Image: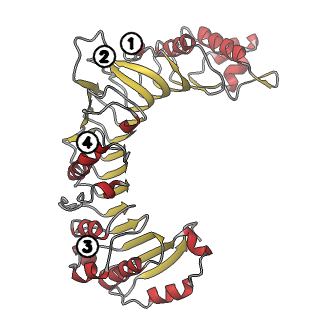
Amino acid sequence: MEAVQTSVLSTRWIDVWTSITNLKLNDGVLICSGKKMQKEQYEYFVNTMLLHLANLSIQSFSLCLTCFHYESSQVSAWISSILERGVQRLEIQYANKIFFPSHTLFSCNSLVQLVLQMRCTLSVPIFACLPNLQTLGLSGIKLVSDHESSTYSKDLVLSFPILKVFEAKGCEWSTKQNLCIQVPLLERFSIAMWNSLSNESCKSSIKIFSPHLTDFSYKGDLEQEIILLNTLSIRTASVVIVIDEDRKESMRRLGFQVHKLLTQICEVEQLKLLLYKVLVHAADIFTHLPVFGKLTYLQLNEVTGEALLNLLHNSPMLNTLILQNGVFDLNEDMLTSASVPQCFLSSLKVFQFKGFNVHEHELLLAKFVMANATVLERMTLSTAFWLQYSDIDMEKVKEQILSFPKRSSFVMIEFSHVNGS
């Protein structure tokens, strides 16, 4: 950007900077005569630059607009100008609403990477296809069907033949339309969305057809059903669910939605499952679990004793178990009557207990693990932050835990605070 700035402002460099094919523009860092550019100066700078690039192709273009409010037509014109130059990698960041040149975008077959962090509406043609696009990142985008594309369709289809990475955050579309992602070579899929922020009831789904998908990530409230088609190749999954307790209709079907999603990713090797307020309204989620036959890594945040035991029994190959916020609703009778999970006898080597509050049921769980995990190598107990201000004698607690019977002769017991010390 500095090279372009120097060249635009000095005619002596006019023939030099036009050979630049990678541009990064940020209205927060451009300097003119030792001072930060004003809005009018910046607009003139960008317009002049694009004028001189009229007959050149741009490989990479990044535009970050965070300091000023621009006319929607001005920003749209800049984006159109770059798209018409056969750009391969395009990244736009702008907080205000604009009219996005959707037709120009979907006509830009040269795009390999596209990242849009902005508030705009993107009209998706019914036969939209960016043949060379490999990475797509969308944030704050509203997706709509192109009104000029035939009649209204119940499905909003995104189809990219060689796309490998799809990431969407805070995007939206009609609550009556299904979002269909048909990407045969997709490897990583990540979406974060909360439909509960809208007053409209959601009756749609997200359908993903990606036979090569290996990394799946979902953050949201599961207002929309997730349907994974031909995705047995998923190896790593992250599911974070935060619900709005005021939406009673959603609460009634929450358990079914979570269970269905878990069933579709039961072939994963690594699973991060973070549920916030979910088990209060859907305690039966873990009652009839699928078998996670390949699962070696499991991270949980809110989990009952019964749910934890069910998960362990259905994860025979589990190697690493991480409890972010401990466990609740666990008693001695439950552990006494429980059979030992298969993973305890053959594969569990690492157990991390974060947010350890030294409650009786937590000590019981630590004792149960130590007494039954045959090949356990390391157990880490990270005490809750408040304990450092309490009257609890942690040295005595450590002595008590270290005195528990150990099934594994080479297990190492570690203690730490939440800050890592």
Quadrant of the rendering where the C terminus is positioned: bottom right
Type of the residue with mark 1: His
Q: Position of residue 212 (x, y in %)?
A: 25, 42
CA distance for labels 1 and 4: 29 Å
Q: Are marks 1 and 2 in contact (CB under 8 Å)?
A: yes
CA distance for labels 2 and 3: 50 Å
The mark that comes first in sequence, 1 or 2, is 1
The mark that comes first in sequence, 2 or 3, is 2
Please tell me which residue lies in front, 411 or 311. Answer: 311
Figure colour scheme: secondary structure
The mark that comes first in sequence, 3 or 4, is 4
Q: Position of residue 58 (x, y in %)?
A: 52, 19
Type of the residue with mark 3: Cys
| Residue position marked by numbered label 3 in the rendering | 343
Quadrant of residue 31 within the rendered picture = top right
In this picture, residue 253 sits left or right of residue 172: left
| Residue position marked by numbered label 1 in the rendering | 103
- Helix, strand or loop under label 3: helix
Q: Are marks 1 and 4 in contact (CB under 8 Å)?
A: no
Q: Residue at x 70, y 26 (%)?
A: 2
| Residue position marked by numbered label 4 in the rendering | 212
Relative height, residue 7 to residue 165 (above, below): above
| Residue position marked by numbered label 2 in the rendering | 125
Please tell me which residue lies in front, 321 or 200. Answer: 200
Please tell me which residue lies in front, 103 or 111. Answer: 103
CA distance for labels 1 and 2: 8 Å
Mark toward the viewer: 4 or 2: 2
Type of the residue with mark 2: Pro
In this picture, residue 327 sits left or right of residue 397: left
